[in-house]
Amino acid sequence: MTNRASDVSRPADASVSPTAAAALAGRMLVVMRPREQAGSLCDRIRALGGQVVLFPVIAVGPALDAAPLEAVVPRLADFDIAFFVSPNAANYAMRFILPQRAWPATLQVATVGKGSERVLRAYGFAHVVAPQDGFDSEAVIALPEFSAQAVAGRKVLIFRGDGGRELLADTLRERGASVEYVTCYRRFCPDNDPALLLDPVARGEVDGLLLTSSEGVRNLRQMLGADGLAALRGVTVFASHPRIVAQAREAGFTDVVETPAGDDGLMQALVNHFG
C-alpha cells in the first residue's frame, strides 16, 4: 500500500540573522531521514525561511524477533559497556528494557552522534561516552575509553539494527574485548509514492536533497528506479559523510556537497551554499 510520506511546508517565523534567513528563503529542500529523526532538522530549515519536503528513504520498526533482546535483559550486569549505534538503537532498547528492570549501575553507556547522546541523556544517563568530534566508528575507536588498555578483558554489548558496519566490534576484539551484538530494531525501505518527490522536481521547485545515510541512497535507487533517479540527478545533494558522498556519486549524482556531520553541520553547509 502506498503511504503519504511527503509534507511540503511553508516557512515558519523565527528570529534568525538576516544573512541566514536570506540564504534559505524560498528554497525547497528534501529531508530524507527516517520520519522519527527528521523533525528537528525540518524545523530548523523552516526557521531559516526554507520549505521542506519530507521524503524518508529509510523506515524503522521493532526487530522482527524480540527473543535476542529479551534474552539479554537479565544478563545486562554481565557487561561493562553498552554501545548504542544510533538514536533508534537507544530508543528501541530502552523502551524494551527499562519497563522490565533498572539499568545496572556498573554498565557504562556509550554511543556516537549528538542525536544518540541526547536520547540517552533523556533516559537519565548523566555520563555518556561519545566522541565530540567525528560521528562514525572511527571516531569512537579513537576515544581513550576504547583504547586497548581501557577495553582489554572487558565485555561490550552493542545495540544495533539488523546489520551494519563491523569495524567497531572487530577493532574492540583485536584490542582484547569480548563483543556481543543484540538487534533491537530493523530498517527497511519505505513504500513512498515517488510522485511526491518527482513532481516538484519536474516543476523545478527542489533546490537540494539531504542524504544522511548510505543505505538511504541505495533505498532511493530502489524506490525510484532508473528513470526516476535520472530525473533527480540535476539536483544538488548534501551528504553528511564521505561514504554517503561516494554512494551518491555512484548513483549518478554529479553535484554533491559533503557537509559536516550532525544538524549543525548540515545547516551551516546549507547557509554557506545558498548564501
Image (tube, rainbow, N blue to C red):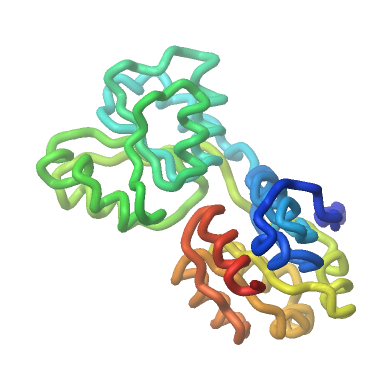
Residue at the spot 40% in from the left edge and 26% down from the top edge: 72
Tally the numbered discs. Answer: 0
In the figure, is residue 234 to the left or right of 212? right
Q: Position of residue 259 (x, y in %)?
A: 51, 67
Q: Position of residue 180 (x, y in %)?
A: 32, 39
The C terminus lies in quadrant: bottom right
Residue at the spot 45% in from the left edge and 37% down from the top edge: 117
Residue at the spot 47% in from the left edge and 66% down from the top edge: 241
In the figure, is residue 159 to the left or right of 88? left
Residue at the spot 66% in from the left edge and 64% down from the top edge: 19
On screen, 60 above or below 247? above
On screen, 32 above or below 105? below
In the figure, is residue 148 to the left or right of 89? left
Q: Position of residue 3 (x, y in %)?
A: 85, 52
* Residue lying at the far left of the rendered structure: 149
To which quarter of the image does residue 254 belong? bottom right
Q: Position of residue 264 (x, y in %)?
A: 53, 54
Viewer-proximal residue, 179 or 263?
Answer: 263
